[in-house]
Image (cartoon, rainbow, N blue to C red):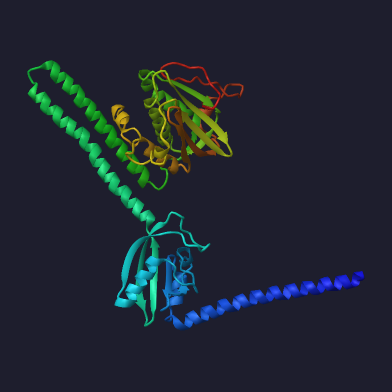
Amino acid sequence: MNPVSVALLALLAGVVVGVGGTTVLFTAARVAQRAEERAAAVVPQGVLQVLDAMEGAASVLDASLTVVAASPAAPGFGLSAGEVVGVEDLRTLVRAVRASGEPKSTRFRMRRPSSAASTLPSEGRLVSARAAPLGESHILVVVDDVTEQERLEQMRHDFVANTSHELKTPVGAVSLLAEAIDSAADDPEQVRAFAVRIQAEAQRLTRLTDRIMGLSRLQSAEQLAQARAVSVDEVVVASVEAHAVQATSGGVTLVRGGERGAYVMGDPTMLVEAVGNLIANAIAYSPRGGRVGVGVRIEDGAVEIAVTDQGIGIAESDQERIFERFYRADAARSRRTGGTGLGLAIVKHAVQRHGGEVRVWSRLSRGSTFTIRLPRCEPEDDDPPKARRKRSDGKPRARRDRSAGSTPRQEERRP
């Protein structure tokens, strides 16, 4: 066969393939168009326009439980046009509506259907479904994912219950100690001892209310009120110095290391509190003679502040819940050290307000590392700390770190 014949055959094959592909596409378009026309013919006027405008999942079913029209979000719940409803709970709901002729609602866990368009996770979601008659032979079904609503409601319930419990403990203690003072009015030593305990309970109550109010402010604020370029060095130094006394009394050494000169956009007071909470936790759960390291790393346009301890560690089953309000992995130890169970929740919300995230790595008996990751920014031109750190020759001036009441050597490694 000569080259001309081969070229002609190849051209002919290409034409055949092109015509075949065009025919397939045309046929598919015609099938879809006919399905829409059939739906328009059987569905009451205006319903299709309403379904197209809906953000939620809604569909119209015929007598055979086949979806004849659906909103754009409906396929994510297994309600695709032209398909028979496969979710048994929905089938039961539709049959009940058809039998009674009245609207009905139900809630159930819907697992992810086999449809590739599904947006449901494999473990299932809590959904609220409502069905109502539409005309003489059709049923309108509306499905809402209420998993997040359920979670928020549970969090609200837990918050109220936990707050009541936590407030009741110190208030009850103060009441009992006041009665004890009244009974021991003739014993000055006993009165002084009870007074000291009352003062401790009052301080605990003050810390708890302050943290509840602070957490409420974080959760209600839509944006940072005083955002500016903040020196991470200043945040770390302030956080370390604020907990030097706690470290000294606990026999724990604070060590600072890592990179310098990083800036993030945010509220310095909020950032100092967040890092300080991590340091306070690390000290509280570290043995005497242990070390707590605070390190900074700059990577890919972000700044990471890591707080590492050599303490008791956190069980893997607890790591997903430690950022919840009032949750304590070791409740007995937390109460002995005066913990409120709100410190890590405050850290989480403060970091989220700054557009960052907080992660945890931990192993039992080996310690934990909490890492705050924040977007990096450039320092402001008139930033006073930056100007103070410049020497006359324009080079950075070395800073002295103070921790645990002394000046430890600088460790430039990441803890």
Q: Residue at x 36, y 26 (%)?
A: 284
In the image, residue 302 above or below residue 138: above
Q: Is residue 34 left or right of residue 20?
A: left
In the image, residue 16 above or below residue 315: below
Q: Residue at x 46, y 41 (%)?
A: 354
Would you identify the image quadrant in which residue 5 lies?
Answer: bottom right
Which is nearer the eye, 99 or 54?
99
Which is nearer the eye, 216 or 170?
170
Q: How far from the left and from the top, in percent, is residue 128?
A: 36, 63
In the image, residue 24 above or below residue 361: below
Q: Is residue 231 visible?
A: no
Which is nearer the eye, 173 or 393?
173
Q: Is residue 282 left or right of residue 213?
A: right
Q: Residue at x 48, y 41 (%)?
A: 356
Q: Is residue 356 visible?
A: yes
Q: How far from the left and from the top, in percent, is residue 341?
A: 33, 36
In the image, residue 58 above or below residue 191: below
Q: Residue at x 52, y 81 (%)?
A: 37
Q: How far from the left and from the top, in percent, is residue 313?
A: 42, 30
Toward the right, the furthest residue is 2
